Image (tube, coloured by chain):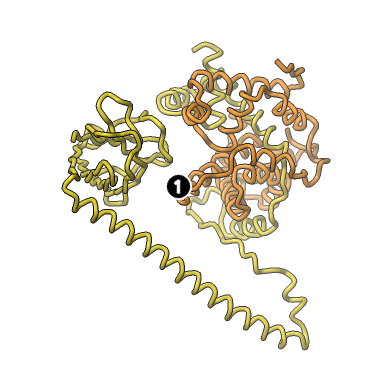
Chain colours: A orange, B yellow
Amino acid sequence: MPPAVPGSETFPALIARIASGDRDAFSRFYDLAAPMAFGLIRRVLRDPEAAAEVLQEVFWQVWQEAPQYDPKRGSPEAWLVMRAKTRAIDRLRSMRRRDRTFVAPVDESIARAEDAPAENPAVVAEERGLVQTALAQLPEAQRRVIELAFFEGLTQSEIATRLGEPLGTVKTRARLGLERLRGALRGERVSAT
Amino acid sequence: MTREEISELAAAYALGGLEGAERARFEARLRAGDAEVLAALRDFEDTLAGLAAAAPETPPPAVKAALMERIAAAPPAARAPAPVRPLSRRRSAIWPVVLSGAMAAGLAAVVVGWTVSATYEKRLDALARDADQLKAELRRQQAVIGILRDPATQVVALAGLPPAPGARARMMWHPQAGGVFVATGLPAPPEGKAYQLWAIAGSNAPVSAGVFSVDASGTGSLSVRPLHGVAAVSAFAVTLEPAGGLPAPSGEVYLLGKS
């Protein structure tokens, strides 16, 4: 959801200006959207320097690929977040390959993310709070599947192996969990069952 | 596809965990502009963007500075790949202010001393790293020689299958000591993929013996540790899998050899 800003500064308008090479628009888009992308990258990658590099790569991609942005395919936030997520997970995998060490278990990264105070709570729109609340309210099994996939980059068969569950169960949980989160984003009542 | 199936595939795709044939099928529907598939994916991606937005974090200012410098030098859609600029932690806007008048000389001495000691520390670090690498390399070589000298070691030849008919590999395998695997003629794995070596004992499920990549000439190698619970290996196989490997083979078989 774009923040409340003048018409020329909505996210789609900024992306269109970036596509035509407008550096001020890029600077503005960065200021508005980088904290969201960085929050996600930091949740995936513990190393702050690696996270900063990934953020730079993501916004470099924004600068280069803005002309290809297609509003029909999704919102600019989703466009940005999917890039940030993909890049962060790529980096995580290459670091895992290189180090051959285990990353912190997911519970630790969740605890960290929840402890970290948002820099400016005023910018966190109400519906975003709703999504986070909804994530916390998801049945544990659904929440685990979403977090292992989205923040740790595990494929569904890797999640099935890790949790010792059949692949079909993992698929169903991912769908149910995301559907419930989507409902929360639309302001539907979230039931706890 | 039913709505539920579409929703399931879109959820997995948005989360980044859709693989293999399902992924290809879903992407084909996306490319074809299937409205229902696009809408399902858009919904879930917006949901995940909302999730990401729930925990914003202020990035270090150096990132924006580096980016603005980079874009000043490049129009958008300029396809030339520009390297990521390293973010210097030492540079700071305070220096010009501090470096004034009489302080400069004293400070210069401190800076020189710091630079010299930093240089030596770096060199010592580098030497320690070199030594560690050499020791590790020596251990690897000794293990290889040990395996080659042992009469119990068997050599298994692997031949290329249809995805890479020209590929060849050798496995020097010792049930207690592990083994050494070398392959040639393999194509470079696509982005996000790697080759995985499997040990097969009779009719049991294949056991992963590790993941490897190949260099520009198509050559790759792997040191394999002894495999727990695998007594008599009857065959070795190589498949193409997602980078990092999987607990059970899912991709095409590139190399196969019976012992």
Residue A98 drawn at (x, y percent): 45, 51
User: Is B127 left or right of B228, judged from the image as shown?
Assistant: right
Q: Given the image, on which type of amino acid does mark 1 rest? A: Arg
User: Is B44 left or right of A96, judged from the image as shown?
Assistant: right
Residue identifier under label 1: A97
Residue situated furthest right in the rendering: A122
Which of the image's four quarters has the C terminus of chain B?
Answer: top left
| Label 1: chain letter | A
Q: Is residue B14 visible?
A: yes
User: Is B53 left or right of B139, judged from the image as shown?
Assistant: right
Q: Is residue B43 visible?
A: no
Q: Say which of A50 and A31 sits in front.
A: A50
Neighbourhood count class around disc 1 (C-alpha, 10 Å): few under 14, some 14–19, many 20 upward: some
Q: Is residue B184 above or below residue B236?
A: below
Q: Is residue B180 above or below residue B247?
A: below
Q: Residue at x 65, y 69 (%)?
A: B90
Q: Residue at x 54, y 57 (%)?
A: B84
Quadrant hosting residue A176: top right
Residue B174 drawn at (x, y percent): 24, 44
Q: Say which of B243 and B218 sits in front.
A: B243
Residue B245 drawn at (x, y percent): 41, 37
Residue A131 drawn at (x, y percent): 72, 29
